[in-house]
Amino acid sequence: MQPSPPPSAAPANPQKARTGLNRIWHAAGYSLEGLRAGWNEKAFRQEAIGAMVLLPVSLWLGRSWVEVALLAGSVVIVMIVELLNTGIETAIDRIGPEWHDLSKRAKDMGSAAVLLALLLCIGIWAAALFQRFFHG
């Protein structure tokens, strides 16, 4: 039996030492934890509930697989960007509660990313609804 490596040689993150299916299994668990953490955020929860309605509607509204993919994808993009924004905010908050210009800038840019994702989603859905009901 080989002796265990000295503590200084052990990776700081055990996930880095995992390989193959073991790594994928643990990564999936971390992803589910991230979704659970996102659910605790009001904005993500609202978007997830909206997605539960909009994703099935996208199957009805889209006339081709491309339209369905655009409609559904735009909804999922909003959720992805919201999770990234929440990650930025959480990391900034961990640094400290005091106000700092760079912290504000990071949070504002994350918020702007969510706004752009929402505008993209709204634009895609508005175009699809117009095409379906007003253009023929």
Image (cartoon, rainbow, N blue to C red):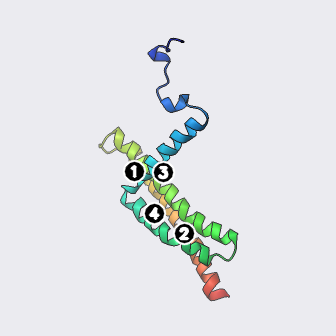
Which residue appears at 54% of the width and 28% of the height? 17
**Badge 2, how many Cα within 10 Å: few under 14, some, many 20+?**
some
Residue at screen point 51% across, 39% down: 26
Residues 15 and 74: in front is 15
Assess disc 1: are there few (<14), some (14-19) or many (≥20) residues with their C-alpha within 10 Å of its C-alpha. Answer: some
Label 1 vs 4, first from the N-terminus: 1
Q: What residue type is labelled 4?
A: Ala
| Image side of residue 81 versus residue 131, left or right | left
Q: Mark 3 or mark 1: which is in front?
A: 1
Above or below, 66 against 60 in this view is above
What type is the residue that disc 3 sits on? Leu
Residue bearing the label numbered 1? 37
Dot 3 falls on a residue whose secondary structure is helix
User: Which residue is identified by label 4?
Assistant: 48
Element marked by disc 4: helix
**Residue 56 on image: x %, y %:** 55, 72
Q: Is residue 136 above or below residue 58?
A: below
The residue singled out by tag 2 in the image is 55
- Residue drawn 69% across the image and 70% down it: 65
- Residue identified by numbered label 3: 84
Q: Distance between the residues labelled 3 and 1?
A: 12 Å
Residue visible at 46% across and 16% down in the picture: 8
Q: Which comes sooner in the sequence, label 2 or label 3?
A: 2
* Residue 92 position in % (x across, y down): 38, 43
Dot 2 or dot 4, earlier in sequence:
4
